[in-house]
Image: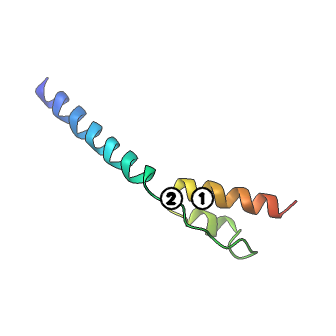
Amino acid sequence: MKLNAVLLSVAAVALVFTGYKEMNRKPQVHAVNDDACTQQAIKGIDNITERAIHSSKCAQRGK
């Protein structure tokens, strides 16, 4: 029972820390060109928010 409470506490602290870190981070601007819009280049972006923004810009570019 105590182990579950400890694991839950550690998970909660990790989630709060990660959320706080992501909320205070400004997304970096990535170039939108043929090389930067490949699937490998998009997958290489670590931050999920930056990846979504970049993917959207690449999709709009293709129209």
Residue flagged by tag 2: what amino acid is it? Answer: Asn
Vertical side of 8 occupied by 45: above or below: below
Mark 2 element type: loop
Q: Residue at point 50% right, 60% down?
A: 26
> Which residue is at the far top?
1
**How packed is label 2: few (under 14 Cα within 10 Å), some, or many (20 or more)?**
few
Q: Is residue 44 left or right of residue 61?
A: left
Q: Are marks 2 and 1 in contact (CB under 8 Å)?
A: yes
Q: Position of residue 41 (x, y in %)?
A: 62, 69
Position of the C terminus by quadrant: bottom right
Which numbered tag is attached to residue 25? none
Q: Position of residue 31 (x, y in %)?
A: 67, 73
Q: Position of residue 62 (x, y in %)?
A: 84, 63
Which numbered tag is attached to residue 47? 2
> Which residue is at the far left?
2
The quarter of the displayed image where residue 43 is located: bottom right
Query: In this view of the protein, which residue sits in the foreground, 52 or 43?
Result: 52
**How packed is label 1: few (under 14 Cα within 10 Å), some, or many (20 or more)?**
some
Q: Residue at point 71% right, 76% down?
A: 35
Which numbered tag is attached to residue 51? 1
Q: Is residue 7 left or right of residue 43?
A: left
Residue flagged by tag 1: what amino acid is it? Answer: Arg
Mark 1 element type: helix
Vertical side of 57 occupied by 15: above or below: above
